[in-house]
Image (cartoon, rainbow, N blue to C red):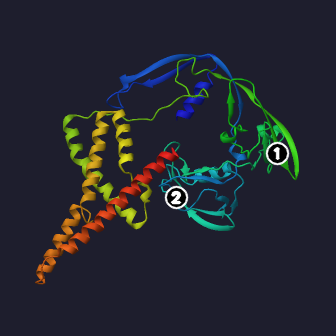
Amino acid sequence: MAHEGDAALKECVDKDAVLEIRRRGPTFDDDDKLRKVTVRLPKKTWYVIPIDESLMEPRVGLVMDHRPADGLLEPDDLILQIGDEPIRSWAHLKSIVEKAASVENPNGTPLKFKIQRGEDQRVVTITPIVGSDAAKGILGIGPKSTSLFAEVKPGSYFDKAGLKSGDVLVGVDGQAGTPTLAGNPKSKIPAVFGVREDKPRTIAIEVERKGQRVKIDLVADAKDEGDLAAAGFQTGELGGLAVGPSVPYRRRPFADAVKMGFEEPVDITVMTVDILKKVITGGESAKGFSGPIGIMQASYSFAQRAFGNFLWLLCLITVNLGIFNLLPIPILDGGHNVLLLIEVVRKWFGKPPPGEKFIAAFQYVGLAFILTLFVFVTFNDISRLIRG
């Protein structure tokens, strides 16, 4: 929706735009909170070389945790087919995946992927889920930018510039290095698509085509748009709307709030037990576990939103720790309960309680487990920080 709003505003070139907005309030159904605002959007010219996902290979660059492709696809996998249909480009891949799950089909349709991984080919079946932003099917993967122009659509900007499907990028603006279509900032090689600047721009590229080198100039098209910054909107570096996260804000009557206060810990408990069960059975990845660093990050983020959000997070952490403490792990309360149970069982059979050596060994095992878990969750937190 933010993208649609951004595009609609930019179409209002040198004319007024009437916006209907809702002021932040305790509920979402207060009609008196609706406001109409008129803003004037003067003309601004941008010079654009468009993004064209048809140019990109259907090669995996990123696999997100806890998404359908997690554990099934790996970075650098090349998608060869979906079902019986050969896949030509990343755009082609997306068009099939996005149709495989929707609001009408929330469970998704299983898709059979034929992939190239190194020297091997294999087939995996993945069921897309509905994405939260556009209500379309997603796998939880991102593309890897390479130097191959996968598919140049007839009549497209790049077709008119003289590129052909199968061309391999070997040079950009005379820069040395290994160029990719999305650029290589480490080698200061600019991108050849997705260019958007406020001054005229020509990018000289060189491609290899059937063993020959061909030089092509990509001239950015001039495009007039409504100037969002001049109209008073907060914008990003490229002149688009700067949109923050959507944070629901609600205030409930006291009685309802008390009722929710009792129900929420129960819901959190059920959710926590369900996640632990899935981790044990392999349905969820333990990579999602967080330690002290993750807790501090989440606490800071929730406290920034509102004090109530911070209290909810404290409730979540408290319930989580309470359940974990009751697990039958030595050194925790659950482990003490296990020792008491062993003592009771031994007493039934007329045997003495466990000896000190057994109890000490039992506790050392638990201590080793807790320390290992601490290192693991800290590693998860640091890995997420590095990935950004």
Residue identified by numbered label 2 = 70
Q: Earlier in the sequence, mark 1 or mark 2?
A: 2
Q: Nearer the viewer, residue 117 or 160?
A: 117
Along the horizontal axis of the image, is 260 left or right of 154?
A: left
The mark lying in front, picked from 1 and 2, is: 1
Q: Position of residue 53 (x, y in %)?
A: 68, 45
**Circle on res. 207:** 1
Q: Residue at x 37, y 25 (%)?
A: 31
Q: Position of residue 72 (x, y in %)?
A: 55, 62
Q: Position of residue 380 (x, y in %)?
A: 44, 53
Amino acid type for the residue under numbered disc 2? Asp
Under circle 2, the secondary element is loop
Q: Residue at x 48, y 50 (%)?
A: 383
Q: Position of residue 15 (x, y in %)?
A: 61, 16
Task: Count neighbours of disc 1 (C-alpha within 10 A) and say few if under 14, some if 14 to 19, many if 20 or more.
Answer: many
Along the horizontal axis of the image, is 134 left or right of 89?
A: left
* Above or below for 340 versus 128: below
